[in-house]
Image: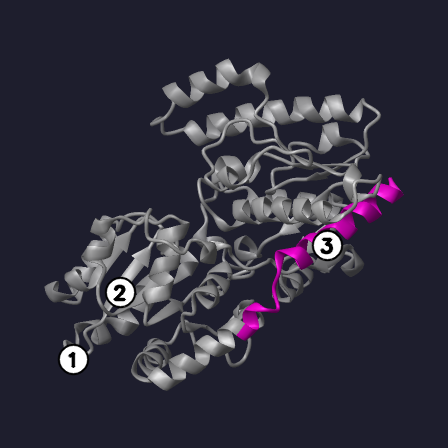
Amino acid sequence: MNIVYDHQIFTLQKYGGISRYFVELAKAIEAEAETETKTETELAKIKIIINAYITDNQHLNDLKSSNLIDINYNQQHLPVINFLQKNLKDFRYQKKIFSFVNQQLAKKYIVKSTTSSSRFIYHPTYYNPYFLTDLGKTPFVLTVYDMIHEIYPHFFSKNDKAKEHKKILLHKANKIIAISHSTKQDLLKIYSDLDENKIQVIHLGPPNLKSKKTNTNIGISFLSSLPNRYILFVGQRDRYKNFNLFLKAISSLLLNEKENLSLVCAGGGEFTKEERNLFSSFGNSINNKIVYYSVNDESLHYLYKNAICFVFPSLYEGFGIPVLEAFDAGTPVVLSNCSSLPEIAGKAAACYFDPIDTTSILNAVTKVCHDKNLRIQMIKEGFEQLKNFSWKKTAKETLNIYKNLCTKF
C-alpha cells in the first residue's frame, strides 16, 4: 500500500504547522514500521511517497528517503526545477508558478499510478481539488486543520479559494481527519449535511524542539541582544492572530519601568510599517521594548525556555501547536479561552482570558508575570498535559484509517 502526500503545503510553506504535521506523521509511521519484524506485515508493505517536486520547505530537511519514505523530487525533471528555482527566486508570482508545475507533475503521477496494479491512498496536504478527475475511484483522506475561512471570511481575500475548495473535498473525501474536537464541532455546524461517521478526531503530537539542547546554532548576537525579562509571542501576527489588540492590552505593562518587561515576537516576519506606527502611538519609549527574531527550531525553543510566559491571544485555532511547544520548553502559557485552545491546554496548565477584552488579557498576563509560585505550578501542569499527546498515537490512528480504506477499495 502506497500513501501519497501531495505537494500543496510544501509549496505554500517554507515553515509552518501543516507541513510540520505531515513530516512528523511520516517520521512516526516510519518509527512504527521499524518496530515490526522484517516479515511481510502490513507495515512492512507500506510506502510513503511525498510528491514535493519544487519546494523550499525546511521541515522536509528532517526527512531522508528510506525504504519506507520516498521524497519524490523526480530526477527526470531536475533541470527544469533547478532552472525555475534559480531564475524565479525573487519573482512575485514564484509560488504560483511552482504550484502550477508541481500540480502538473502530481497529476502525471496520479495517472501513472491509477493505471498500475499498485494500491494507494491519496492524502492531499491542502484543499485544492486538482486531483479529483484523475484520481477516479482511488480513496483519499482529507485533514481539516481549522474552519477559520468559514468563521472569519472577512480576514481573507476574495481570491482565496480555500473555503470553496474545502467544501468540494469534504463531500468527496472517503475519510476526514479533524485535528481537534473543536474543529469537528465547527465542521458539522457549518456543513450539517456531512456524515459524522466519516469524520475522526486525531490530535497532533508534541513538537520535537526539545531535542535541540545546545546553543551552537543560535549565535552570540542573538543571545546578547535578548531582553532579560520578556513575554513571548510566536508566529503570524495579522488578522485572527489578534496581535494588535493584545499589544494594546499589555502596553501599560511594557511601559511600566518597574516591571522591566519586554515583548519578544518570534517568527511571523519583520514588523510592518503599520505595526511600527502602532508601537509609536503608545509612546516612543515602547519601541525598545518590542523586538523581533527570525527563528529556527533551536532558537525558538530557547526563546520559549527563557520567557516569563508565552501568550497566545488568537481568536481561533484548529489545534494550537505553540501551546505544546511552550509546555515542552517548561514555559507558563497564557491564552485565549476559545476554539480548540482549552481542549489542548487543559484546565490547570494555562491561564485563560477573553481575547476581545483588553482588561481580561492584561489581568491574566499580569497575574502570571507577578506570581512565581503560579508559574512553577503551571509549568508542572504543562508537562503533565503534554503527556496526552504523542506522534506515535497520531500515527497509529492515521494508519488505521489508511488500512481500513485500503481493504474497502
Q: Residues within 10 Å of mark 3 (few under 14, many from 20)?
A: some
User: How far apart are labels 1 and 2 at the CA level?
Assistant: 15 Å
User: How far apart are labels 3 and 2 at the CA level?
Assistant: 39 Å
First reached walking from the N terminus: tag 3 or tag 2: 2
SS of the residue under disc 1: loop
Residue 258: image tag:
1
User: Image height check: is 395 above or below 408?
Assistant: below
Specify start and end residues of the magenta stretch as a single range: 384-409
Q: Residue at x 56, y 31 (%)?
A: 52
Q: On the rendered structure, is 36 left or right of 91? A: right
Asked whether 385 or 236 is in front, the reply is 385
Residue 263: image tag:
2
Q: Find the residue positioned furthest to the right.
A: 408
User: How far apart are labels 3 and 1 at the CA level?
Assistant: 51 Å
Give the main secondary structure, helix, strand or loop, of the magenta stretch: helix
From where the camera sits, is residue 103 visible? Answer: yes
Q: On the rendered structure, is 319 left or right of 134? A: left
Tags 1 and 2 touching, CB below 8 Å: no
Tags 3 and 2 touching, CB below 8 Å: no
Q: Residue at x 26, y 54 (%)?
A: 292
Task: Give the colouring mode of the picture.
Answer: one colour
In this rendering, the count of numbered labels is: 3
Residue 396: image tag:
3
The amino acid marked with disc number 1 is Lys
